[in-house]
Amino acid sequence: MTAEPVLTVADLSVRIAGLHILQGVSFTVAPTGVTVLLGRNGVGKTTTLRAVLGLTPRGGEARGTVRMGGRDLLDRPTHRLVRAGLGYVPEDRDVFAGLTVAENLRLAERRGSTPAYDRVFALFPELDRRGRQRAGSLSGGQQQMLAIGRVLLNDNRLLLVDEPTKGLAPKVVTEVAEVLERVAETVPVLLVEQNLAVVRRLATDAVVLSAGRVAWAGGAGELLGSAELTRSLLGVGSGEVRA
Amino acid sequence: MTDSMVEAPPARVPDELTPHRRGWHGLRPYLPLVALAVAAVLPYSTLELPGIFEGPLNSPGTLQLLAVCLVFGGLAAGYDLLFGRTGMLSFGHALYFAAGVYGTDILVTRAGLPLWQAALLTIVGGTILAGLLGAVALRTAGIAFAMVTLAFAQVGAILVARDFGGLTGGEEGLPLDVSGLPAGLVGVANTVNLYWLALAYLALVVFVVHRVSGSPTGRVLAGLRDDERRVGVLGLDPYRFKLVAFTLAGGLAAGGGVVYCLIVGGASPHITSSELTLSLLVMVVLGGPGTRWGPVLGGVGYMYLDHRLTAFGSSDAVESLPVFLSRPLSQPLFVLGTVFILAVYFFPGGLASLRSRLGPLTRHLPARRTP
Amino acid sequence: MLATRALTWRIGEVAIVDGVHLDLAPGEFLGVIGPNGAGKTSLFNLITGLRPPTAGQVLLDGEDVTALPPHRRARRGLGRTFQSSSVFGSLTVRENVRLAVQAHRGGSMKLWRRAAAHRGVAAAADAALDRVGLHHRGTALASTLAHGEKRKLEIALLLAGEPRVMLLDEPMAGVSAEDVPELVAVIRSLTGDSGRSVLMVEHHMDVILELADRIAVMHHGALLACDTPETVMADATVQEAYLGEAL
Amino acid sequence: MNTIVLLTLTGLGLAALYFLVASGLSLVFGLADVLNFAHGLFLGVGAYGTWWAAGNLPGAGGEGLGFVLAVAFGVAAGTVVAVLVELVLIRPLYSRTIEQVLVTVGLSLAGVALLQATWGADARPFPRPAWTRQVTGILGAQVPNGGLLLIVAAAVVLGALLAFLRWTRYGLIIRAGVENREMVTALGIDVRKAFTLVFAIGGAAAALAGALGGVYFGTVSPGQGGSLLIFAFIVVVIGGMGSVVGSAYAAVAVGLLQQFVNYYGASGVGDLCVVALLAVVLLLRPQGIAGKVAHA
Amino acid sequence: ATACGSPQDTASGGGDGAAPVKVGLVYSQSGALASYGKQYIEGFRAGLDFATRGTGKVGDRAIEVTEVDDAGDPAKAVSAAKDLIGKGTKIIAGSTSSGVALQVAPIAAQNKVLFISGPAATDAVTGANRYTFRSGRQSYQDVVTAKSFIGDPTGKKVVVFAQDGAFGDANEAAVKAVIGGAGATVSSVRAPASATEFTPFASQIRSAKPDLLFVAWAGTTAPAMWQTLDQQGVLSSTTVVTGLDIRASWPTFGAAGAKISFLSHWFDGAADTEAAKAAKAKVPGGTLDLFHPDGFAAAQMVVRAVEQGGDDVDKMIKGLEGWSFEGVKGTMTIRAEDHALLQPMFQAKLTGSGSAYTATAQKSLTGDETAPPVGQMKG
Ligand SMILES: Nc1ncnc2c1ncn2[C@@H]1O[C@H](COP(=O)(O)OP(=O)(O)OP(=O)(O)O)[C@@H](O)[C@H]1O
Ligand SMILES: Nc1ncnc2c1ncn2[C@@H]1O[C@H](COP(=O)(O)OP(=O)(O)OP(=O)(O)O)[C@@H](O)[C@H]1O
Ligand SMILES: [Mg+2]
Ligand SMILES: [Mg+2]
């Protein structure tokens, strides 16, 4: 890697309720392209993303360094980080169920930048149509669209995206993948994804977590190209991808 | 980025999460019995605890105070069955307690029934009342449920205050006619019997609540606290289980009312006020909802403070302070309110969490979530 | 076994579920696919009774159960998982499953028995946990599970109830690639011998294709088609509206 | 006829008082999801603040501009106390509803006791312009001016709150924040500020209600806030948590119901009717008249 | 010292001739009635000083007073009473609120100690049991005083405006008995104690066109009530009688105050007795208020009881029954049959404005004129 990484995570360790969930995770995110974070259920992918954003739950504690643009992010309030251009698509979608779709989007507008509604509605026309519906009554997939649309409203310096295609119909998965691909042309993305087809299409770099540690890090092509690596790290044959 | 191959550590085995039965824990099941025995022989001690009680432990004043505290410990434990263990926020629990107090008082004083009949009728009546009102109120949930129960309790308060047919004595209350009561329950010298009665009530409630929450039903109640819809889809009728919990808690409260009526020797409209329900909530939260001893500690502690702070407020120690301190401190409610606030910050999770914060052995007991 | 007759749910003018006729034979595995918002989860909600339909019926073993509340339907052997995991967060994983076993076996309304003393329940619960591979997490509070683990617990809860008709709502969503085959095996084992029927919503086509005997396609609340996987996959509308181009 | 007019207008005056108390409660309860039992304290601070200012603050008094100044002082005092309470006591406890209840209950006990310790338990005469004690003849009815003042004030407060919710993003932020604070911060919004603001507005509304309540009652006493609170709670719940308009409707319903039943029915039945109304509304529509969503 | 004892031990009272006499005062030091309690205790201290001529002793026995706060809660009062009795106290006094008085009275009887109820005005304390006395006035005496405002009641129309509950009931019943019994037609308008808007009630009263309106209203909503009665023209259209409350409440009558005829238990200057002078000299601030006489009389009764009975409660009762003494208000008599305290009552006018109001006595009625009917001793 020649270019300066946009995000550097060094020796990040997280404890929650007495459990040592991340045990010294270190990796970097390249200034372009998509870095995927892979690993089995429960290894700490979500915990990593949330720690970067300062969202470690109450009673939990994150140690180590997380640097972006020369500044340490840990211990800075989340809303500052986000205003500074860190976009987050949470795992559980976390749309505001009591608010309408339009209100959810309005809330995501950031002061100082013009919200790119065109971009969002071109991608998810459904969100335009359902503007007045309560987000809680959206279907699972529609909620996922809203959660993604929300960050795309603004211009970001880095996107943290946690399983964006979960629960989406195959056609929409393809569309979301395309969007992320397009987004990644301008904004680096740190992506957690279980759908290997999507990973294959998007990833430039890969980090594999295992039980709270980094088990492997390197180029995505290298990982997915090697049957041995995919089998030992991801538990699947390299050709075995889901549509 | 460098390629690296890191040996994955062995999977975490959260053995610290498994319930442990080590060392002195073998004794633990018996601790409640030991505590009960100690409490039962307490009245034989002439120990003086200056500042804590006015007189020696066996003095009637101390026993009376303890009896009141114990009843409220039991009441709080019963309320916790609703609130801490099933997640139902009722703002009307005082109604069933008041039904117990006024029921006993009216049946004894106005109808002249012997105590045991009055008590039996009252408890049965209080339970039925809770069943009926619960059946209606449980058609709502959440804050709406809290408010409907509050509304019912408020009706109770208005009825008591209106003094229909001169039954309740209105705001002056109704002193208990003791002429028909067993002699052992009358007179200052017999305060100890009231103390034992209160202790028995507390023990009964704790036993029942413990038993119920450890029973299959208790497991369902805990499930209801988390996700009612889920319980329904598992094939259990949430409404029925909530009604059972509500009725049972109502019956326990009515029983507490009977005991309280004997201890205080009458009924007064204080106990119908919505403040009492709120104090029940405060007791439970103060102690630690959903824990075995928390609500009891909360109830006993609350009542102790409530009674003793009046003495604290008029004590010389307070009076000798500068005015800007002594004025507020001589207001018992000021001190009580301040204690609540401090308790929330210094004992999050209630008094019951103190143990887990002090004893590393118990640190990993799963913390109960407050609903 | 399970059938719906002209099942409809409208909100105002919009039909979310629109006159769905569905028949599920004993032992059959029926996959349900359809675009996001097609009404699949809503259909499940109508079948399990979490929402009252505006028209139509739900039949279980030929009997009309449309008016029954969810728990009565569950008693008759209807079980489901939820799309967004709903487990009992303040109970441990094991207690979660025990509750489900107990609900199924009856005796929940026992105020005075010791729940823990029920051997059969504990054994059945452990068996269910074993099957989804969550045994080692038995003592963790369910609320602290990672996302994928919650999905597995959902399935364990379903298994514990030994339902005859199972409704699975996107069981694979968020499950790591490595665990998919395992879970697929679990789900397959549900039907195999016992004559149980499964209705499964899933967006992972490979999983659907692997498991389903027939596939139902929903679109805008209506049932577009219900046929063998081959026919359905060949259908041009399905291709266009649902699958799109492969990645 | 003039009895009807009189009962209606005085009933509306009562409704206005309920609304003034309920509006702040409803805002804090509906938006910030805090069951604020300390609302009565804010009321008391507003009332005592006004009372104190009228007697001690240069330029303030019981008449004309001086009175306006006194009320402004009272409202400011209430607002400051509310903000302090939020910053110091409530902020660490968001999403811990029950602990909040404990703290606000403690606060209401301690606060009222503090007022009592400072100014005594007895009611004090409240400074107020002479015209508020007079009556205005409307269609043959002698309507107390104090009641009319309340109606006007309630209408102004209603308008101001609606404008706040409609024209600013704060309503949105707070409603979202109640659902999921974390996610609101993850959208780059400092949710804490918004909550403080809601408390400030709630406190200001309460303090205004306290000051105008003082005019209406003619006295100020430590427990006054608490006694109005029960009805305010009922109004909030009937109206639908957090809906300001709903609270307004509910206040009118409760005020008129009480007034008419008290006149035509037996005494005390008015209160029972209000409680019955609450139970019926909740059983039929658990989310209250205006639904659960907290907005205009 | 840790020791074992019997759970039914209670300290025995005195015995020794020179041991101090324990007197327990259970009254409101905090809570809503704290200011009544304050007057009571000041009165008691002054009375004790007066009755023992500054020695604080009866014979050579000191009077040892223990004060306990009940915060207006009967449950706390009962606990306190039991505590005191357990420690050998033979005389309990206090009870600022009626609820407390009614709950403590039976405790006194059960344990055979003397109970001298304080400001609590409920009629039910009179004749509650032979151990219970009262040092203040009762509602009935208020009503008889009210009656004195209309001359001959025959054919007159009287309306009672009272709050719901026992306090209102008692007043309504008393008016029916006293004024109705004397030939007036009595009707009543009742309002919930929690009412905040009084127009409906004022309209009802006005349309009833009474010759006399008797108002029995306590609590913080009173000023609003008076203002409404005034605004709706009730005060100027008829004679309105009500009880005069503590001084602090006088300014809250506002303009209405001048239009009301007050019956009064006591106000500073109502009578110029020896005891009143002594009390004035002793009381902090030098101004007497509504409940100073009750505390004062309680102290006089305590001293009398000890003089006559020593440690023997039966003898105390004997010594008090039928006893007449000069209290702050004038001549007071403890009626032997039911322990009613016969005492003078006053008619008063309120004048002034702003925060400076003065009450002036119009007339005083003797204890016999205001005597309640003789009742049966209930317990
Ligand atoms: N609040 C919490 N308290 C206790 N343990 C927690 C908490 N949150 C997460 N964990 C634990 O931390 C571990 C990692 O969780 P995390 O959500 O980061 O996994 P993940 O890699 O995102 O998994 P998935 O693929 O299922 O989403 C899990 O074992 C989980 O049980
Ligand atoms: N209360 C409601 N009001 C309005 N529309 C609703 C409501 N509830 C559901 N819907 C709409 O009904 C449609 C069907 O939703 P449903 O959850 O059944 O979809 P689904 O097929 O399960 O989709 P997915 O695959 O994304 O989970 C969606 O478009 C949703 O927005
Ligand atoms: Mg995750
Ligand atoms: Mg769905």
Image: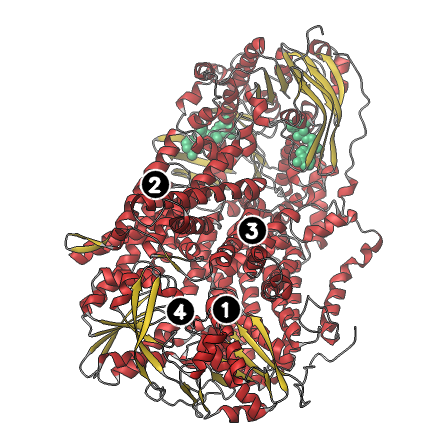
Cα–Cα span, label 4 and label 3:
36 Å
10 Å neighbourhood of mark 4: few (<14), some, or many (≥20)?
Answer: some
Q: Amino acid at mark 4?
A: Ile
Q: Is residue D5 rendered to the left or right of residue E270?
A: left
Q: Any mark on residue E246, and which?
A: 4
CB under 8 Å between callouts 2 and 4? no
Cα–Cα span, label 3 and label 1:
24 Å
Of badges 2 and 4, the one in the foreground is 4
10 Å neighbourhood of mark 3: few (<14), some, or many (≥20)?
Answer: many
User: Looking at the image, can residue C175 be seen?
Assistant: no
Q: Position of residue A115 (x, y in %)?
A: 46, 17
Q: Amino acid at mark 2?
A: Val
Q: Chain of mark 1?
A: E
Q: Amino acid at mark 1?
A: Gly
Q: Is residue B100 above or below residue C126?
A: below
1 or 4: tag closer to the N-terminus:
1
Q: Quadrant location of ligand 1?
A: top right
Q: Chain of mark 4?
A: E
